[in-house]
Image: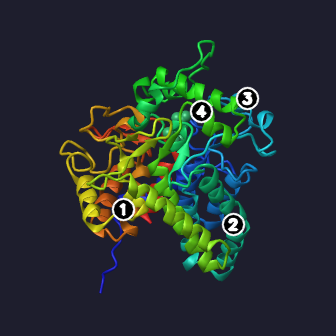
Amino acid sequence: PVQPHAAPPSRHRTAARAAYVLAGNDRGRLTVAAPQLYPHMWSWDAAFIAIGLARLSTARALTELETLLAAQWRTGMVPHIVFTEGEVGYEPGPQRWACRDITADAPDGPATSGLIQPPVHGVAVRRILDAARTASAAERRDVAERIRALWPALLAWHRYLATRRDPAGRGLLTIYHGWESGLDNSPRWDAAYAAVTPDPEFVPFRRADLHALGALGGAASQRPSDAEYAKYQWLVEELRRAGYDDARAHRTLSFRMADVLTSALFVAANEELATVADELGLPGVDELIGYADRFRRGVVETADERGFAADVDLRTGDTVRTQTIAGFAPLLSGGLDPARQRLLLATLTSADWCGHPGFVHAVPPSTSPSSPDFDPVRYWRGPQWPPMTWLMIWGLERSGEQETALALREAALDQLSDGLFAEYYQPFTGEPLGARPQSWTAAVALDLLA
Ligand code: 9YW
């Protein structure tokens, strides 16, 4: 029999600190992503936060998803930012997006952005349902009822993605902006951004992010560059001019990428929701499984002989192969043949990735240190991001790769035991970078420690 053993005290301390961080960033019905740098609700952060909160209170975890989904657009789109009224410390803010003035599809409630982020919400729903298994009958009933109430919104979100973001039915989701990938300035998007040219009259707005990071003692070298930011802002302008209309966006935007990581996460979320539907007797199981199958094929089709996946530039038709964490998308979607699955795992643990001998913690960097695009401090171009590590652990556990998952989990817990819950980490020094404390970092720590 397995001997029960207590976790070392430092882990308890880390869990307690993580809970304290989430409580501190709690604004009642939502948790801000990071108080100084990101004082609003971000879509995929909210899902990770709900995964962490599920370990503390299934009721509070559901509230997080309810708040996000209350800001859903009439098209089914779940916006990437839900703005906190009166908060002016983030750009672009609600005035710049002006969604409600531009389209009747935007909700009447809180102001939102007009973009998406990766659809990991279904993963959170399943985790909340699972967390309720050992709860009282009353709590289980409450969780089931609230998931039932959210169900039409969740289905509409997945339907929006499967139709408007993949009109050609190729099994890959289109993004209109690097921000939609959640991996903003990843080298994945360099080639596409090279073709984005702001109008000469376009006046870029102020870099509130640099100001906020400076106040935290961080350097501009940890954020995207000014040249990158001007393009990010210009794409928002293009989207406004397209009236936030998907059909027009597909025709007119100067950035249109098929995002393989977002697509793989969509596969996983469809599978998780299908399981929830099956358990709670909710409609849509076949539809969700159909989406999962279609997008799994789409993801696997991009993989090379080592199983490493790629994005596709929909404007040029080019397959864009970069040495970024998105290459591991098939570990999240499944569907690789066993030989390539083994090769992809070997790549993940190799010196080009987690196993680099110079790394303080053997967790995946956002970009491979062997890539010429690698930068150990700049955002998605090298640093290690705890929610990405969480996703890899989760994907590995789900596909039965327990040994690799366990090694990653231990390394992740070591990294998180600094108790700072930074936004990202320098792989060679272990230095915490970006915002801190960052809610989703605390949330994944809580989940991993449970
Ligand atoms: C920004 C909130 C968000 C994350 C993104 C990350 C960053 C916002 O922060 O984007 O203005 O740079 O790239 O994935 O959701 O944590």
Amino acid type at image mark 3: Gln
- Decide if residue 223 is on the left or right side of residue 199: left
Drawn side of residue 238 relative to residue 408, left or right: right
Name the residue that disc number 1 marks. Answer: 9
**Dot 3: what SS?**
helix
On the picture, is 74 further left or further right than 128? right
> Does label 1 or label 2 sit earlier along the sequence?
1
Q: Earlier in the sequence, mark 2 or mark 3?
A: 3
Which residue is label 4 attached to? 253
> Of callouts 2 and 4, which one flags the residue occurring earlier in the amino acid sequence?
2
Q: Are marks 2 and 3 in contact (CB under 8 Å)?
A: no
Say if residue 394 shows up in the picture.
no
Along the viewing direction, whichever of 110 and 348 lies nearer the viewer? 348
Q: CA distance from mark 2 to mark 4?
A: 32 Å
Please tell me how crowded label 2 is: few (under 14), some (14-19), or many (20+) other residues with Cα within 10 Å: some
Please tell me which of labels 4 and 1 falls first in the chain.
1
Q: Position of residue 446 (x, y in %)?
A: 47, 59
Q: CA distance from mark 3 to mark 1?
A: 48 Å
In percent of width and height, residue 255 lies at 53, 33
Helix, strand, or loop for circle 4?
loop
Q: Is residue 352 visible?
A: yes
Q: Residue at x 67, y 48 (%)?
A: 27
Please identify the residue farthest to the left as the structure is shown. Answer: 357
Mark 2 falls on what kind of element?
helix
Specify whether 398 is left or right of 252. Answer: left
Seen as rendered, the residue at the extreme bottom is: 1
Mark 3 — residue? 95
- Which residue occupies 65% across, 71% down? 284
Residue 227 location in percent, x, y? 47, 20
Displayed quadrant of residue 136? bottom right
Quadrant of the drawing holding the C terminus: bottom left
Name the amino acid, label 2: Trp
